[in-house]
Image: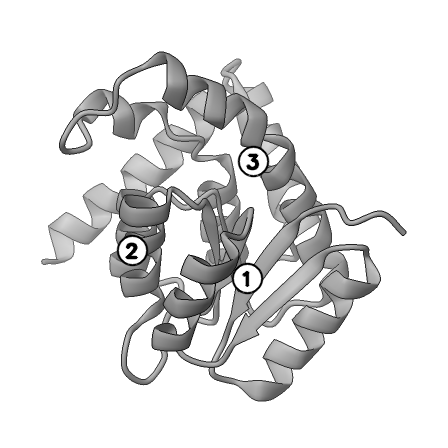
């Protein structure tokens, strides 16, 4: 099977790490794995993966720390696989610019379509980076341009204990009911979560 892309998988749970890494390898991806953030950064510098799958809460460097380094220093896109989906975590995931956010427990059948979709977006993301000079800090326009659909799906999965496909179907139905685009509906949902979070602060 031809290699479909190079994936860095980071999780301090060895069973989860082995399961995800094996599933990706079986699907034809070249897999690099690490069980902590420090090793993840060293491996990313050496191998320059096409995509990283990151756990969030780990001993030492968190998945957020690793994500910030991948974004700022290596320009490697990343997604999160986490058991946590509280409002603060959702906001941080959005701010970092993750390409997707999946809530555990997960099986490889849920992960593979998201990985494939993220990798399919890479040429467009690279072209956009080349065409537009990157500002020193992300602007409000940059944040608005993020694809919030995966993030909104993650929120629905957590809030209503839904599998990913059902959460996506619900988001599509909400968009159709309100005659909005899927991206617009996702943005409104994420904004609502942020407003609720600020109200509780």
Q: Position of residue 24 (x, y in %)?
A: 73, 62
SS at badge 2: helix
Q: Assess disc 1: are there few (<14), some (14-19) or many (≥20) residues with their C-alpha within 10 Å of its C-alpha.
A: many
Q: Assess disc 3: are there few (<14), some (14-19) or many (≥20) residues with their C-alpha within 10 Å of its C-alpha.
A: many
Q: In the displayed image of the protein, which residue is found farthest to the left?
A: 201
Q: Earlier in the sequence, mark 3 or mark 1?
A: 1
Distance of mark 1 from mark 2, alpha carbons?
Answer: 14 Å
Q: Position of residue 128 (x, y in %)?
A: 42, 18
Q: Residue at x 73, y 55 (%)?
A: 29
SS at badge 3: helix
- Disc nearest the viewer among 2 and 3: 2
Q: Which residue is mark 3?
A: 171
Q: Residue at x 48, y 81 (%)?
A: 35
Check residue 8 in the rendering and tell me which mark sits there, or answer none. 1
Q: Which residue is mark 2?
A: 69
Give the vertical position of 138 relative to 116 (above or below).
Answer: above
Q: Earlier in the sequence, mark 1 or mark 2?
A: 1
Distance of mark 3 from mark 1, alpha carbons?
Answer: 29 Å
Foreground pick, 140 / 137: 137
- Disc nearest the viewer among 3 and 1: 1
């Amino acid at each position: 099977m031809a290699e479909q892309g190079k994936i860095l998988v980071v999780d301090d749970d060895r069973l989860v790490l082995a399961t995800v890494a094996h599933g990706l390898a079986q699907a034809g991806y070249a897999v690099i794995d690490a069980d902590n953030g420090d090793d993840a950064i060293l491996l990313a510098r050496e191998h320059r993966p096409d995509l990283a799958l990151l756990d969030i809460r780990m001993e030492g460097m968190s998945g957020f720390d690793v994500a910030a380094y991948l974004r700022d220093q290596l320009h490697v896109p990343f997604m999160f696989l986490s058991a946590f989906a509280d409002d603060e975590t959702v906001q941080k995931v959005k701010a970092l610019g993750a390409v997707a956010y999946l809530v555990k427990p997960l099986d490889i059948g849920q992960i593979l379509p998201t990985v494939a979709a993220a990798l399919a977006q890479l040429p467009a993301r690279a072209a956009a980076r080349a065409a537009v000079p990157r500002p020193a800090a992300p602007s409000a326009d940059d944040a608005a341009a993020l694809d919030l659909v995966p993030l909104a799906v993650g929120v629905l999965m957590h809030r209503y204990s839904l599998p990913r496909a059902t959460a996506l179907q619900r988001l599509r139905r909400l968009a159709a009911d309100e005659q909005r685009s899927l991206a617009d509906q996702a943005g409104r949902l994420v904004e609502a979560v942020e407003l609720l979070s600020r109200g509780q602060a």
